[in-house]
Image: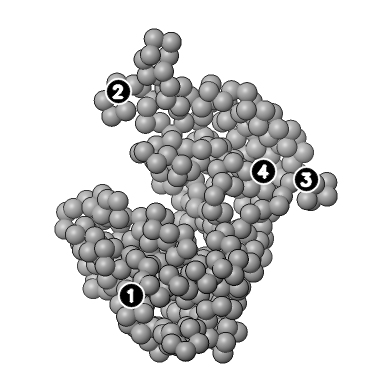
Amino acid sequence: FEEADLEGKTSLYTMIDRDEDGNLIAIPYHEYFAEEVQKASDLMKEAAELAENEELKNYLNLRADALLTDDYYASDIAWMDMKTNQIDLIAGPIENYEDQLFAYKTAHEAYVLIKDMEWSERLSKYAELLPELQKGLPVADEYKAETPGTDSQLAAFDVVYYAGDCNAGSKTIAVNLPNDEKVQLEKGTRRSQLKNAMRAKFDKILVPIADLLIEESQRGYITFDAFFANTMFHEVAHGLGIKNTINDKGTVREALKEFSSALEEGKADVLGLYMITKLHEQGEVEGDLKEYYTTFMASIFRSVRFGASSAHGKANMIRFNFFQEMGAFSKNAETGLYSINFDKMNEAMNALSEKILMLQGDGDYEGVKALVDEKAMIGEELKMDLYKLSQAGIPVDIVFEQGVEVLGL
Ligand SMILES: [Zn+2]
């Protein structure tokens, strides 16, 4: 692949195949999947006819055209400009997770979404607070000199339908799109929180985990609002911190190579909690801080189950071990139940934030490797706890029952 002299080979929207003579060729998706995309495009045009919202109508028409050319730019811009639509549709070849070779090739997917107007309004104000929060990060000044962008939109949705890539394997509960960097520079991104999918994971996975592993007196602190906030602020917290190393090693991503996403996910988790703590102090976030901390902790058990091959899984293993060593939680040897030590939590959160931000800013590949080698693992005791969860039949992820029949249409 690297040696092939082939136009369009690294494109997000081409299939690599061989022609009759055995030569490598790059075929655009809209030719390779001509029949499928024509059908999808026709349906989107039909939907555009029915759409009452002008912005949505315009977007559906542009997106329907884009599927037939694989030029998504105009429809991405139209999507970012949609503000008043209550129905939303994300569709096309979007994420590259399935391409395990070089992450070039995207896979088709679609989400049908209903916007939660009230929640979306509440969320939109948080992005504006990022620059202020950046200044307060628990790390030396040179690691927080960058100015975070405030151009991200935050919105909450209920999902009506998942199809294709997003319905294969683990189910997304938050999406940050579009991926096109040109659109991002012009319009920012929209971070969409998928509320009902989150609620399902909370009810079917997180609460049963807490019932088995968290001290009874603290289970009352496990709340959906806290789970929602932790997930949401994770997304926002990707915008905090540092993107470029401070010692000329280029971007953090380049310097940390294969460890970059695990560390970035770990950063977003812990800085998300940092944001909540700060905003709670300022009265911008409601509820008892104990709810956010306990729910955060219980959520680690949920996420380490994704395993070491997932960036999220690895990040959670590191955090579990780091927090345990700092005494942020402890396990009762007799009952086997965990309890959170709220007074140590803040300290552990700040220490881990500082460590990650410095590793990123220094582009310290060896340092991250050491952290991963030492802490991204599941100890004997945790292994037994996770075994307990699978014995109890608690699923690792949810599966959707969906479609027109389920909706009774
Ligand atoms: Zn993330």
Quadrant into which the N terminus falls: top left
Point out the tag, 1 or 3, that comes first from the N-terminus: 1
Which amino acid is tagged 2? Ala
- Which residue is located at x 34 percent, y 21 percent? 6
- Bin the neighbour count of mark 1 within 10 Å (Cα to Cα): few under 14, some 14-19, many 20 and up: some
Residue 173 location, quadrant: bottom right
CB under 8 Å between callouts 2 and 4?
Answer: no
- Which residue is located at x 41 percent, y 85 percent? 330
- Bin the neighbour count of mark 2 within 10 Å (Cα to Cα): few under 14, some 14-19, many 20 and up: few
- Bin the neighbour count of mark 4 within 10 Å (Cα to Cα): few under 14, some 14-19, many 20 and up: many
Which amino acid is tagged 3? Val
**Does residue 237 appear left or right of residue 365 in this picture?**
right
Against 322, residue 365 (above or below) is: above
Question: Residue 246: percent from the left, percent from the top?
Answer: 20, 60
- Secondary structure, mark 2, is loop
Which amino acid is tagged 1? Phe
In this view of the protein, can residue 155 be seen by the observer? no
Residue where numbered disc 2 is placed? 4
Residue 20 location, quadrant: top left
CB under 8 Å between callouts 2 and 1?
Answer: no
Tag of residue 322: 1
Point out the tag, 3 or 2, that comes first from the N-terminus: 2
Question: Residue 53: percent from the left, percent from the top?
Answer: 71, 45
**Does residue 333 appear left or right of residue 197 in this picture?**
left
Tag of residue 257: none
Residue where numbered disc 3 is placed? 404
Point out the tag, 3 or 4, that comes first from the N-terminus: 4
